[in-house]
Image: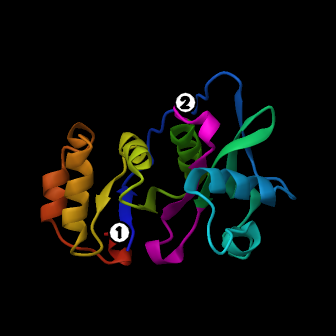
């Protein structure tokens, strides 16, 4: 199972401040291939292919305003989605499919597009956020820690996995409560709301 991270409060979010030359906008009809390209560049091609229609478009949470793009010359180069997954509770937004094209990494675009997603959650009346990620997505985990997300245990083996990710990559200053988290309880999804 993927690692889970939670941001317990969306109060006091900083404004989005993209680097010069970049703009933020939402998905437009017909941009399926652009979304697929950004994700393929970020995650690598999927087998079977990661198609917008089956990955995002068929989900009840799919509305264009929830799928955000950072663009350069109106071409999407980063994306993140402000999703809703009922299992996490009505107050929680779900950060979904964050990706940045290779030629645009190192500019904190993943940070800014994820922050824009958090602002979208506030607009929708949500008060907290959750996401799932993989152990090897180290730059993404660093970004999420910088945004105030913290590890959230949903399986026993995640104690070891989180400790390895945080300690191996020197993230302790970003997550001083690590020892408390990895020594704490394993949760079920609905427990996020408690």
Q: Nearer the viewer, mark 2 or mark 1?
A: 2
Q: Where is the C terminus found, in terms of image quarters?
A: bottom left
Q: CA distance from mark 2 to mark 1?
A: 32 Å
Residue located 41% across and 47% down the image? 144
Horizontal side of residue 39 vs 14, given as left or right: right
Name the residue tied to disc 2.
Answer: 107
x and y, in percent, of residue 65 in the image: 73, 54
Question: Is 124 in front, or is 148?
Answer: 148
x and y, in percent, of residue 26 in the image: 74, 48
Q: Where is the N terminus found, in terms of image quarters?
A: bottom left
Q: Which residues are magenta?
A: 83-108
Horizontal side of residue 159 vs 95, given as left or right: left
Which label belongs to residue 54?
none
Question: Is 144 in front, or is 2?
Answer: 2
Local packing at callout 1 (Cα closer than 10 Å; few below 14, some 14-19, many 20+) is: some
x and y, in percent, of residue 53 in the image: 76, 71
For mark 1, give the secondary structure.
helix
Which label belongs to residue 192?
1
Residue located 67% across and 71% down the image? 55
Q: Is residue 149 above or below residue 132?
A: above
For mark 2, give the secondary structure.
loop
Q: Is residue 8 above or below residue 185?
A: above
Marks 2 and 1, the one that precedes in the sequence: 2
Q: Is residue 17 magenta?
A: no
Horizontal side of residue 53 vs 41, given as left or right: right
Residue located 44% across and 44% down the image? 11
Local packing at callout 2 (Cα closer than 10 Å; few below 14, some 14-19, many 20+) is: few
Q: Is residue 146 above or below residue 20?
A: below
């Amino acid at each position: 199972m993927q690692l889970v991270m939670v941001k317990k409060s969306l109060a006091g979010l900083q404004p989005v401040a993209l680097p010069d030359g970049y703009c933020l906008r939402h998905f437009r009809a017909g941009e399926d291939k652009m979304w697929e390209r950004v994700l393929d560049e970020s995650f690598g091609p999927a087998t079977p292919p990661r198609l917008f229609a089956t990955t995002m478009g068929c989900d009840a949470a799919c509305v264009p305003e929830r799928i955000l793009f950072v663009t350069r010359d109106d071409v999407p180069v980063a994306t993140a989605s402000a999703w809703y997954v009922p299992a996490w509770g009505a107050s929680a937004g779900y950060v979904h499919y964050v990706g940045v094209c290779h030629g645009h990494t190192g500019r904190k675009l993943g940070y800014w597009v994820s922050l824009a997603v958090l602002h979208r959650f506030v607009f929708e009346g949500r008060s907290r956020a959750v996401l799932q990620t993989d152990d090897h997505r180290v730059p993404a985990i660093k970004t999420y820690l910088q945004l105030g997300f913290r590890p959230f245990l949903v399986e026993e083996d995640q104690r070891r996995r989180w400790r390895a990710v945080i300690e191996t990559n020197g993230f302790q200053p970003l997550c001083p409560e690590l020892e408390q988290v990895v020594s704490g309880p394993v949760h079920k999804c609905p427990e996020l709301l408690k």
